[in-house]
Amino acid sequence: MFIRLPALLTRLPRHRLSFFQAKPVTQACRFLHGRMEPAVVRCLPGEPKLTISFTLNGSNKHMLRDQDEPLGKALARISHNKAKKPKKLKGQQPCEAPVPPAVKLYHGGDEVPDTVLNSEAWREGSVLQVGDVKFFVQRNAPTFTIAELPVSLLAGFPVCPKLEVEFGNLQDCEFTWYKEKAPDTSPEAAEEVTGQDPGWTQVGCGRVHVPSNQDIGCRLKLRCTPKDGGRSGSAKELLSVAAVEAGPGMCTFDNRHAYTVKETEWPTVRVVSYNILADIYAQTELSKTVLYPYCAPYALQLDYRQNLIKKELAGYNADIICLQEVDKGVFVDSLIPSLDAFGLDGVFRIKEKQHEGLATFYRRSKFQLLSRHDIMLSEVLTSDPIHSELLEMISANDTLKHRILQRSTTLQVTLLEDLHKPDRKICVANTHLYWHPKGGNVRLVQMGVALKHLSRVIQEVAPGAPLLFCGDFNSSPTSGVFQLVTEAVVPQQHPDWSSSEPEESCSMELCSDFPPLLSACNQPAYTNYVGGFHGCLDYIFIQPDSMQVEQMIPLPSHQEVTTYEALPSVAHPSDHIALVCDLRWSP
């Protein structure tokens, strides 16, 4: 951020102090009147360089100068660049080098001495004069460092630009959307467009735009102005690479959105748990030919599925969202930009040895992040003494122990504080347990480690905080994992202990550190529906003495799920179905 003048005066050398003392910042504002173009200066304490950027005669100038360099040298460089000898064309007489223009910097109406250092000379509201052209200086003006539109645009689905702003606030920025008047489906597009184009019609404003069917075949343009309160930076114009395409029509989640039109009001909290199908799994040959052969190839493409995922999540108006199988690139490039626009902040935990992981989002108007306590289950099993008893029991079977320690299964633990009642906290856990159908014993050990870790986190960091445990547990309601969570104990004779090969079998009683938890969405017939399998694998577990279920959002009907045979499909982006429920804090 720029340094304000009063603070600067105390640090200036005495031989320069009198110049700036005599020129209050308010005088410089008079120079902003008129139609001067900006000269944007980026100068941060502790960095050796500053940048000076402006446009002169249609040419973009971008200079990198030392902060401790005298102003005179920077101005001389600007003058030299302006006076470069033009190239001689064939058959022309040699041209004389133009006379370098006078380049001056003014502050408060007076010329800034050449001896003043760059870091001190380029002040907000100063005026740079290059020959007869004047520029008003913006120091550390709000600037978009990243501004991109998504590649795929579907009618009826939200378009959320990826934006990062320096020295500004995304909530203050201004956005105007346009569509081209004449359809143009050419994939060629410039990333930036300058000036007004009569071929565009304004269609909306706001950070998110939902194209209509009337926009099909037209490209979109976004003009975005970075701002920080009343300060504005240079606007950017972005042109979509492709034209808007027709959407798939009715999706499996559209009817569900009728139950979630509005955000909940305190003390109710809406929670979503959803395995969104990682792109690294959807794009394998196995997925295309064996797992999901019924799914149209284009519907497995990431750009297409992301349109559906963003619309589905946005329509739930949730306060807490726990996602599994999240590609790192999807989190950064798609989920963060879109969910941030809808009022949610998020955290991500990569799964070791993988390119996907877990993501937890929370509504920033209701919660603030206090701390994170993520772990890799196999790692803490051997390194954390609180798991020594469990480690000793499984060590009796080296084959099973080896299989468990090979897994990179992760537990994401996010501690949130309720902004409406700051003394109230909630521990949000998110996981995706081992997938193998014959891995019931592995999942039991993983859940034992997870529950003990969560118990300690709550006891040490947030005593009394309720647990909200979401995830894809890869466990049916008859599994040992479900029994451990909902009954607080699983006996040594449970069949899951011998679910794998005989040499990996074990027999032990495993107890939970929590009293029985409740499955907030009950036990649906299925939360995963593919060609060769359907079953209930996903849950939202709560502590019934701390939270009650106010509403469970109905799952899609069987007809909706099977319209295109199974999941995923052109109308559903994942092989799993999102669990959504409204929970109410207990008195």
Image (spheres, helix red, strand yellow):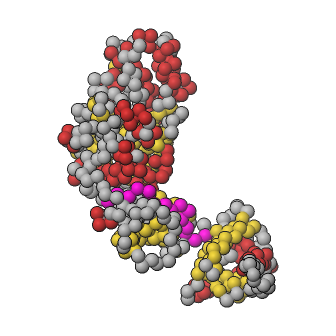
Magenta range is: 140-155
Q: Is residue 204 left or right of residue 284?
A: left
Task: Look at the picture and state if 418 lies above or below 69.
Answer: above
Residue 365 in the image: state x and y as whole percent.
39, 57
Q: Nearer the viewer, residue 159 or 351?
A: 159
The residue sitting at 23% across, 32% down in the picture is 525
Taking the magenta stretch, the answer to whether it contains residue 151 is yes
Is residue 359 at least partly visible in the picture? yes
Number of marks in the image? 0
Task: Look at the picture and state if 246 lies above or below 483.
Answer: below
Taking the magenta stretch, the answer to whether it contains residue 62 is no
Instruction: Name the quarter where the C terminus is drawn.
Output: top left
Residue 472 in the image: state x and y as whole percent.
36, 34
Residue 31 in the image: state x and y as whole percent.
60, 87
Q: Is residue 370 left or right of residue 183?
A: right
Is residue 161 at least partly visible in the picture? no
The residue sitting at 56% across, 62% down in the picture is 145
The residue sitting at 42% across, 60% down in the picture is 242
Considering the whole magenta stretch, tell me its main secondary structure: loop
The residue sitting at 22% across, 53% down in the picture is 258
Instruction: Name the quarter where the N terminus is drawn.
Output: bottom right
Task: Look at the picture and state if 268 lies above or below 216.
Answer: above
Q: Nearer the viewer, residue 134 or 260?
A: 134
Q: Nearer the viewer, residue 59 or 297?
A: 297
Residue 559 in the image: state x and y as whole percent.
19, 41
The answer to which quarter of the image holds residue 3 is bottom right
